[in-house]
Image (cartoon, rainbow, N blue to C red):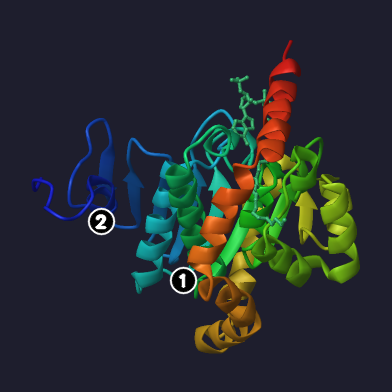
């Protein structure tokens, strides 16, 4: 195995199969390529079908910190440039959870510099996902609040497990405000009236409620989520790719461009907003309430 190259992060090289990270595996078989690293994003590429499964793997709740978001971005970039890849399923390796959203500890008592770096990583991961040429499907096998809901909504199709799991943009409940591009994605998904209610209330929906407002496309028993995604993918894969990609791009371009044109301003705004005393106080209380839930 080659030594790490200068000027290129070990993480990026690991994803490109150039180095074998300590404790990790890079396995290549005829039909499957798995890029498994000590990190938090597992990619399994089935080269026979052209479908990659990307699993978030940061137990217990797949909260999205700087590292996870950076890894996710790199994984998505790599799949985007892999000509054999046609579709991507976003899923979780942690039972009972899709993603708990942004890691609240990245936003609580952090430095402005870290906040900006964290936000840039989120912007890049989202731009890569929402702007992807691939068919993207979310297999939601657990809770999916806030940033988890953003990731799911940014896919082309969503299948959610029935039962106790919840999904939604609950930011106001934490005393924070969903950024404009979260709002844009929700508007594109469920329309203006439902978004207005959902965002003000910080609503978290059951799978059935989410289905009724169009936040997810299908609700099935937990064990059926992956087979349902695979079945749906067969339909999507039959559509001529160029026509589908042009359609998707034209429908998403305005929302993507809106963030692209003001990334730095948005990152600065986030860092300033999140470090306000009143916001820090709300976040502190929310963290305490999560911990109290256990006692
Ligand atoms: C004026 C105009 C302003 C314009 C706006 C400008 C800028 C925008 C500013 C801010 C926007 C920022 C956007 C944020 C989006 C987000 O994603 S915020 C994150 C929201 N997430 C949540 O609310 C989820 C909270 N978690 C839960 O509800 C539950 O954990 C769960 C997901 C339902 C799972 O429950 P379960 O019982 O299985 O697990 P536990 O609750 O016991 O959790 C286990 C463990 O994990 C910790 N944890 C949970 N969620 C998070 C998280 N998101 N981040 C970090 N840590 C988390 C939890 O505390 C437990 O920890 P332990 O006690 O140490 O074991």
User: Is residue 213 in sight in this rendering?
Assistant: no
Quadrant where the C terminus sits is top right
Figure check: 106 above or below 289? below
Q: Where is residue 206, by image quadrant?
A: top right
Where is mark 2, residue-wise? 16
Where is mark 1, residue-wise? 86
Residue pictured at 58% horizontal, 50% vertical: 272
User: Alpha-carbon neighbours of circle 2 within 10 Å: few (<14), some, or many (≥20)?
Assistant: some
Distance (Cα) linking label 1 and label 2: 18 Å
**Position in image of residue 285 (x %, y %):** 73, 26
User: Left or right: where does residue 122 sit relative to residue 41?
Assistant: right
Residues 85 and 279: in front is: 279
Q: Where is residue 248, by image quadrant?
A: bottom right
Foreground: disc 1 or disc 2: 2
Residue pictured at 48% horizontal, 64% vertical: 264
Which element is circle 1 on?
loop
Residue pictured at 91% horizontal, 67% vertical: 193
**Position in image of residue 275 (x %, y %):** 59, 42
Quadrant observed for ligand 1 in the rendered image = top right
Residue at disc 2, CB closer than 8 Å to ligand 1 = no
User: Left or right: where does residue 195 sit relative to residue 24?
Assistant: right
Which element is circle 2 on?
loop
**Position in image of residue 233 (x %, y %):** 60, 66
**Position in image of residue 121 (x %, y %):** 45, 54
Q: Earlier in the sequence, mark 1 or mark 2?
A: 2
User: Left or right: where does residue 107 sit relative to residue 153?
Assistant: left
Q: Residue 286: which numbered mark, if any?
A: none
């Amino acid at each position: 195995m080659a030594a790490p190259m200068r000027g290129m992060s070990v993480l990026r090289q690991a994803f490109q199969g150039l180095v074998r990270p300590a404790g990790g595996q890079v396995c290549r078989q005829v039909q499957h390529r798995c890029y498994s690293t000590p990190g938090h994003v597992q990619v399994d590429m089935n080269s026979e079908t052209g479908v990659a499964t990307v699993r978030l793997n940061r137990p217990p709740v797949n909260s999205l910190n700087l590292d996870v978001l950076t890894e996710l971005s790199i994984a998505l970039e790599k799949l985007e440039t892999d000509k054999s890849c046609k579709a991507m399923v976003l899923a979780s390796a942690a039972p009972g959870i899709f993603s708990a959203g942004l890691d609240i500890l990245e936003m609580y008592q952090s430095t402005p510099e870290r906040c900006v770096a964290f936000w840039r990583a989120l912007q890049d991961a989202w731009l890569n996902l929402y702007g992807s040429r691939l068919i993207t499907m979310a297999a939601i096998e657990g809770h999916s609040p806030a940033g988890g809901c953003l990731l799911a909504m940014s896919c082309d199709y969503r299948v959610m497990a029935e039962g106790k799991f919840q999904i939604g943009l609950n930011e106001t409940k934490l005393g924070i405000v969903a950024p404009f591009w979260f709002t844009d994605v929700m508007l594109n998904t469920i329309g203006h009236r439902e978004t207005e209610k959902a965002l003000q209330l910080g609503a978290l929906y059951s799978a059935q409620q989410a289905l009724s407002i169009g936040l997810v496309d299908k609700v099935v028993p937990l064990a059926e989520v992956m087979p349902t995604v695979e079945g749906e993918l067969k339909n999507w894969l039959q559509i001529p790719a160029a026509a589908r990609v042009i359609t998707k791009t034209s429908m998403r371009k305005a929302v993507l461009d809106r963030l692209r044109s003001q990334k730095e301003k948005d990152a600065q705004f986030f860092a300033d907003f999140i470090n306000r005393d009143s916001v820090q106080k709300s976040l502190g209380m929310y963290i305490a309430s999560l911990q109290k839930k256990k006692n």
